[in-house]
Image: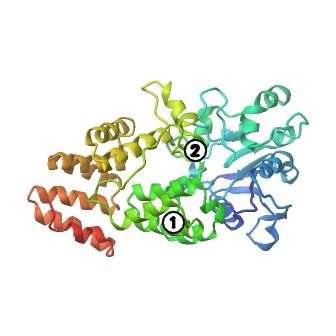
């Protein structure tokens, strides 16, 4: 077994007055994966919680992003007693401890590269970030006054000042990508991540219900929450999607988008994507950044060389619109979209799955079967993938194998309605 990284010069820290129990969960997960010199939780309710070996410091309540930015930039340094601080959040923490690099400590600031900028100042996101004692002291400069959001204040607005006046060292982009990911698809196994919309890939299924119950209503009402719901739907994780959407409608009863998604789960078409609204350039970017698409991943794609990997938001944008075309019966446009996604992401299971469905609709069950099997190789737990493979096999007269597909789904998800509707259909 690998030994966990020993980081005596690093303080692990979370600052949270909104989702304190989930922030403590993030601290606990990180502490299990690395040995830190110190661990610190800052909250207005810190004295109501306990976590082994963690300093609990009560602070005035932080009630907005602007207040959080001011605290992190101007107050955080007084609580740090080590050379570096790893600042984490409830939706950003360590996931690959073996990816820690000692060279991370050579820099004063590291955060995931931003996907929506195309200059040399793309490092980076503050939700999971490494900051040095030198940086925390430098941020007290009286000329640093435009503070919100705090990570852009550090990485963009005042980066020239921090570098020239204080010699602050920002990690190169390739180092930052190895450290963490947020809006750009990860390469390899980064040390950590940030972003609620990534929770489908890191949160165990058995923890989902308790996790969303602990979320503050404002977090449940956020755009990132509904994006995570969509991620679960597109992955075929209907139980998780239903749990999340029901919680969303408890908090936002008139949310038509959540209601439509929930309805699509109970009466899906035979493998065809649920109804999608075409995304436009002024819509929120699918990467979950909160920016408009044309100012985020859409801006990146316009001037990006063909050989350069596309950002996650651009891939999601193309996939979403291909699925919208598919649902509307525009098969040529849908096929073009799916193939474009696969050109950049050959292992995108959702695009493979729906391209297989489309190919079967066009009367080529042999090719459709090949595509469905490739999708299953990547996501063997997807009920819909087995159902659509069964449809291909049924069309070829391979009835026993088709029944085996449905039996497999029933064995792992007995209450899954589409299976019983599928048996005997062509």
Residue 19: x and y, percent?
69, 64
Left/right placement of residue 365 relative to residue 25 reads: left
* Residue underneath mark 2: 181
Q: Residues within 10 Å of mark 2 (few under 14, many from 20)?
A: many
**SS class of the residue under badge 1?**
helix
Residue 53 against residue 202 in the figure, above or below: below
**SS class of the residue under badge 2?**
strand
* Residue underneath mark 1: 244
Total number of numbered discs in the rendering: 2
Residue 5: x and y, percent?
64, 52
Residue at the location (53% across, 36% down)? 297
Mark 1 to mark 2: distance in Å? 24 Å
Disc 1 or disc 2, which is closer to the eye?
Answer: 1
Residue at the location (57% across, 72% down)? 210
The quarter of the displayed image where residue 61 is located? bottom right
Residue 6: x and y, percent?
68, 53
């Amino acid at each position: 077994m690998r030994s966990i990284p020993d980081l005596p010069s690093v303080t692990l820290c979370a600052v949270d007055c909104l989702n304190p129990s989930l922030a403590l969960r993030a601290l606990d997960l990180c502490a299990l994966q690395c040995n830190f010199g110190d661990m610190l939780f800052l909250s207005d309710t810190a004295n109501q919680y306990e976590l082994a070996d963690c300093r609990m410091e009560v602070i005035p309540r932080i009630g907005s992003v602007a207040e959080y930015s001011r605290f992190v930039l101007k107050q955080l340094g007084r609580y740090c007693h080590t050379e570096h601080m790893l600042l984490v959040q409830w939706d950003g923490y360590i996931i690959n401890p073996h990816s820690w690099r000692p060279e991370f400590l050579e820099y004063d600031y590291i955060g995931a590269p931003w996907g929506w900028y195309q200059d040399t100042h793309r490092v980076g996101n503050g939700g999971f970030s490494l900051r040095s004692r030198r940086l925390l002291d430098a941020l007290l400069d009286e000329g640093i006054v435009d503070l919100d959001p705090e990570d852009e204040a550090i990485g963009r607005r005042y980066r020239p000042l921090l570098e020239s006046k204080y010699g602050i060292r920002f990690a190169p982009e390739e180092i930052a990508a190895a450290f963490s990911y947020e809006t750009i698809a990860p390469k390899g196994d980064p040390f950590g991540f940030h972003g609620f919309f990534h929770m489908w890939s890191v949160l165990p299924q058995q923890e989902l219900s308790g996790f969303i119950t602990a979320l503050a209503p404002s977090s449940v009402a956020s755009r990132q929450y509904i994006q995570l719901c969509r991620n679960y739907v597109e992955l075929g994780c209907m139980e998780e999607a239903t749990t999340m959407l029901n919680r969303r409608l408890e908090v936002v009863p008139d949310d038509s988008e959540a209601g439509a998604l929930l309805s699509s789960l109970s009466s899906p078409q035979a493998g065809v994507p649920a109804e999608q609204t075409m995304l436009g350039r002024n819509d929120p970017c699918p990467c979950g950044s909160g920016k408009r698409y044309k100012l985020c991943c859409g801006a990146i794609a316009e001037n990006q060389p063909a050989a350069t990997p596309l950002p996650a938001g651009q891939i999601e944008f193309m996939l979403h619109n291909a699925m919208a075309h598919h649902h509307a019966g525009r098969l040529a446009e849908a096929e073009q979209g799916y193939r474009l996604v696969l050109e950049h992401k050959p292992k995108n299971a959702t695009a493979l799955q729906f391209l297989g469905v489309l190919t079967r609709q066009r009367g080529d069950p042999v090719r459709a079967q090949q595509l469905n099997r490739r999708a299953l190789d990547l996501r063997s737990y997807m009920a819909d993938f087995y159902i659509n493979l069964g449809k291909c096999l049924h069309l070829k007269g391979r009835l026993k194998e088709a029944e085996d597909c449905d039996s497999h789904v029933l064995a792992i998800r007995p209450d899954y309605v589409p299976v019983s509707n599928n048996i005997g259909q062509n």
